[in-house]
Amino acid sequence: MKFFTESVARCAARIGTLSGFERMPNVSFETPLLLIYTKGGSVPHLTKDVFKMITLEQQLLSVSLSSTVLMTDVIKEFNTSFADFVSMKEYINFLSIHDPAYTTNPGFQQLDSISVWSRTGRNVFTANKYMDLVQTYKPDLYVALCDGDTNINSSTKRVSKAVLRSKTLLEQCLDIHLHSDTLKTKGILGPVEGGYNLQAREESINYLKDKPLTGCVIDGLHNNGPSVQNISTEQIKEVVQHTINLLPTNKMRVSMGCWNPVTVLDLIELGVDVFDSSYPYVITEQSEALTFMCNHDICDQYKMSIVEKIYKDDFSPICKECECLTCQNHTRAYLHHLHHTKEMLGLVLLMIHNTHHYLQFFIAIRDSIKNGTFNHLQTKIRLKYTSPNSKFSPTTV
């Protein structure tokens, strides 16, 4: 697997190409790239057929260990890959450790293991146990086991332990990866840990930069979950900029978590290449519809809550310019009705719209970088999030 970019700048928005997948050699992805968030290997609220109605293009699915770990024994028993088991073999898949849409329980890390939380409780993974699971799943791309249990409030001692533990686990994972006939053609990503400690970040990168990795995950900035959407660029800019300035320019850079679109654009401007779509899922779970990409005056906010009474008799679509199945066939009033009658279809229709909206966002990002209009897109989206009608208030330092 290989990542290629013509950009030689370290901290700048850039176009890249991810290709060389053994299972699908003709498939390639252009970055900045959106990983499609899944739970248990499926896009939440959507059947496979409905997801194909949203987009016919090849997508890269984000699969978390925490939402799939209970499947491990059955997959191993059937002697099949994860993609085949969940009937998503048409898609490339990326295995991460924690579910970015749900807050990860802090603590519980041990000397040589990481705690992963599923719906039945705590699961402890050593490097050997994790790599055994990876060889069972056979993902196209995956993250080495790591300790990303840090945030802005983490102590120096906690950060130091996270860096040391992650280095040890990476060494063990990489050794198994390189000697496995099943995995050596797959892509492996190394985690950059260190919390908000610049020296610790530098120590982590110095260990990673010469390793045979497809890319790096800028980890340890948060503990996942909906609260990530409220983290401002000001809080993370110094540490992300310092990290990227030290990373090789020919390696892909990934940042997981439900960052809001303004922060996503700022991270792309700093040189981050890949994100996941947990943000539109979290917005859907809040019974809200994204409108930050809409160009007409009616959609003057970045999102709308279909719970509000003002939509009870509003027979217009979420966005009259949107081409998604929801906006082409249903009204705000109908979505309001579905929510208040607790119909499952309400979340289905919101997920269709929000997923489509976010995919269009990333298409616009790539086009703007190519056309030299990225700064204009940044300004446009930022205005939506800071308009008088917006209730957006990101956390600042």
Image: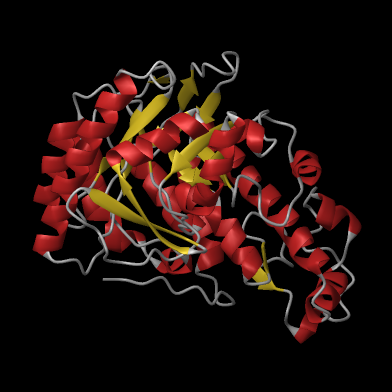
Q: How is the image coloured?
A: secondary structure
Relative depth, front residue between 196 and 237? 196
Q: Position of residue 54 (x, y in %)?
A: 76, 43
**Would residue 221 appear left or right of 38 to someone viewing this image?**
left
Q: Quadrant of residue 299?
A: bottom right
Query: From this viewpoint, is residue 367 visible?
Result: no
Q: Residue at x 53, y 27 (%)?
A: 30
Q: Residue at x 39, y 63 (%)?
A: 104
Outermost residue, front side: 77
**Would residue 339 appear left or right of 225 to someone viewing this image?**
right
**Would residue 233 appear left or right of 370 to someone viewing this image?**
left
Quarter of the rendering occupied by the C terminus: bottom left
Vertical order, 385 against 44 (above or below):
below
Vertical order, 263 against 207 (above or below):
below
Relative depth, front residue between 135 and 194? 135
Query: From this viewpoint, is residue 68 visible?
Result: yes
Q: Position of residue 329 (x, y in %)?
A: 90, 56
Q: Position of residue 288 (x, y in %)?
A: 67, 69
